[in-house]
Image (cartoon, coloured by chain):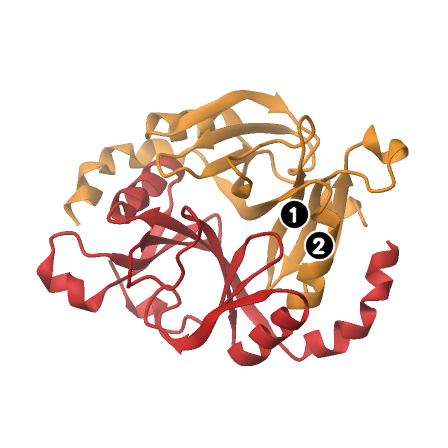
Chain colours: A red, B orange
Amino acid sequence: MAQEEVQNGGAEKVAAVKFTAVKPQLMVEAPKAVDAVQFYKSAFGAVEVGRTVHPKRKAEQELPHILSAQLELAGSIILVSDIAENSTPVKTDGGGCVLCLETEDVKAAVDKAVSAGGVAVGEITEDDGACCGGLVGKVKDPYGYVWAICSPAKKCDDVKA
Amino acid sequence: MAQEEVQNGGAEKVAAVKFTAVKPQLMVEAPKAVDAVQFYKSAFGAVEVGRTVHPKRKAEQELPHILSAQLELAGSIILVSDIAENSTPVKTDGGGCVLCLETEDVKAAVDKAVSAGGVAVGEITEDDGACCGGLVGKVKDPYGYVWAICSPAKKCDDVKA
């Protein structure tokens, strides 16, 4: 694995960024996330441990846009989110899976990913969506996957569906 | 959440299937998985803990098709696989992320997922790829995501890159 050795020089910079969790976020065409959550419960026995809905839509519509439902499955957390024009953190090409990567130092992590060849998608913003508040920066990797690098999901445990 | 109550009747059947792990599998156009692995190391500090290559291609080509590279990231495992015509367990529409779900009872899990509204993709087969051997059955959920339901990845720890 000669390529591993070539890039060992970057190891020290990487060590400065600690990630605390990686969570697949399944983007679903709005407003089907509510159905998708039900499916993952029925099909796989997933347990919903939290849900964050769009604060403005909540009162107006019967089925609020789900910014993020947090499902526990096989000891891991997966997120299910409605894709909507202006409420979700990341709109991928034709839906798809976003990988949420949690860290205390969002900016350093985004910078490092970009320096490694990723492409930043927009700016780092304050977000109250998938990652339960805090900063979120998005990076598209050279293979088409979007990584949502965000603050740790501290508030998730308080949001019960 | 009226919909939760409606489907509570299925809870006992779900309880019979235990899942031991869920792992996002990033499908990458062959033969770029080797580069993708390097990127995830450089960008996020991922650590490769195992790699399974296509046994027949190994001797023939300089860059063997990666059936599955197992990367540890933030305490979780993600898988990176080359998409190839005849060697990878799942070819998704235009690449994408597959969710590997490990269980001792692949058939019961596939049946349950299908009864919940998923669509089986092919038959349950013996596989030496992403899941490190054992059975694998694929189910496409109603939202377009492919779940690879497979035997627990017992051999992964023995495969060092």
Residue A9 in the image: x percent, y percent? 81, 73
Residue B19 in the image: x percent, y percent? 49, 41
Q: Of helix, strand and loop, which one carries label 2? A: helix
The three-letter code of the residue at mark 2 reads Val
Marks 1 & 2 on one chain: yes
> In the figure, residue A90 lies in which quadrant?
bottom left
Q: Is residue A137 visible?
A: no
Circle 2 marks a residue in which chain? B
Q: Is residue A38 above or below residue A113?
A: above
Q: Which mark is residue B1?
A: none
Drawn side of residue A20 relative to residue A12, left or right: left
> In the figure, residue B5 lies in which quadrant?
top left
Mark 1–mark 2 Cα distance, whole angstroms, equals 7 Å
The one nearer the camera, A14 or B111, is A14
Q: How busy is the neighbourhood of tag 1: few (under 14 within 10 Å), some, or many (20 plus)?
A: many
Drawn side of residue A48 relative to residue A92, left or right: left
Q: Which residue is mark 2?
A: B37
Q: Are marks 1 and 2 in contact (CB under 8 Å)?
A: yes
Q: Of helix, strand and loop, which one carries label 1? A: strand
Q: Is residue A113 above or below residue A12?
A: above
Q: Which residue is mark 1?
A: B80
The three-letter code of the residue at mark 1 reads Val
Q: How busy is the neighbourhood of tag 2: few (under 14 within 10 Å), some, or many (20 plus)?
A: many
Residue A29 in the image: x percent, y percent? 31, 47
